Image: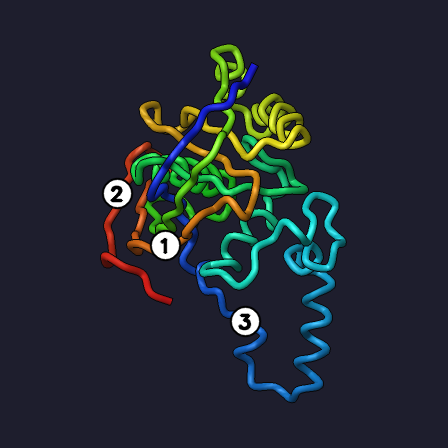
Amino acid sequence: MAHLEEIDFTGTHRLIPEKYSNEQVVLETLRLPEHVLSDLNELDGATSEWKRAEAGRSAGLGPHELVFGVPEAAIVNASFTHPGPEGARFSSAKRGAWYAGLKFDTSVAEVAFHRRRFLQNVRNEKFHGRQAFSYVDFLADFRGKFHHLDPDEQRSCSQAEPIPACYRAPQRLAEKLLFEGSLGIVYQSVRHSSGTCIACFRPALVLNPRRDARCRISLDTGSDSIEVSAHSTAAPV
């Protein structure tokens, strides 16, 4: 069975698309009459999973679990309140998690795999061939007792394909551990054989989230080649 081990990770890497990395609410930047903004905010609140969770209307996440008044709170909360329709390896479509690689290269490999898979499934020809995407590298620290998988669990939870069927076993395990109070899981990366990843289940345990370099990932839908370039050493808001 998965067992607990004390961890002390500093500066783990999570790559977030640059277009989603701005904390400012888009509606707040619009120059519209106050009553129009009020109506738009009400509509946004009815459809935003983040705001649904804040109001206690999310099936997967309670408002007491979100973080407020701390740096990058919006970024942290969004990772838990906006899971993908298929979920991810250790999180469901109802509740997300903060995924990160202990090394930058691991995070790049994970992100590039899923980006390439998405492009390969798009039928529009303009999205085929070499494409480039901009990301912000968010660093975060983790301390405490996190679950580690035993060899059998590692095998059953590390199937590479097909997606989303290969997520079923790890999602069941994660749901069980989450119900039992788990903080998260440390596991071997599926897309970077020498890498280690963490899936943190609790927003408050994403410690000291901060922005590091902007980077650009260039990949080809017809090959496994990946090119990475850093825009700068820091990524201010």
In the picture, the quarter occupied by the N terminus is top right
Residue denoted by label 3: 26
Tell me, yes or no, whether the two marked residues, 3 and 1, touch with CB atoms within 8 Å: no
In the rendered structure, the answer to whether residue 2 lies left or right of residue 34 reads left
Q: Residues within 10 Å of mark 3 (few under 14, many from 20)?
A: few
Relative to 229, say whether 40 is above or below. below
- Residue at mark 1: 136
- Residue 234 in percent (x, y) is at 27, 59
Q: Could you say which is closer to the camera, residue 182 or residue 57?
A: 182
**Mark 3: secondary structure:** helix
Of residue 205 and residue 79, the one placed in the foreground of this image is: 205
Across and down, in percent, residue 186 comes to: 46, 28
Q: Which residue is mark 2?
A: 227
Instruction: Give SS at disc 1.
Output: strand
Which residue corresponds to the image point at 41% horizontal and 27% vertical from the top-left?
189
Whichever of labels 2 and 3 marks the residue nearer the N terminus, that label is 3
Q: Do the numbered discs 2 and 1 sit on residues whose CB atoms are within 8 Å?
A: no
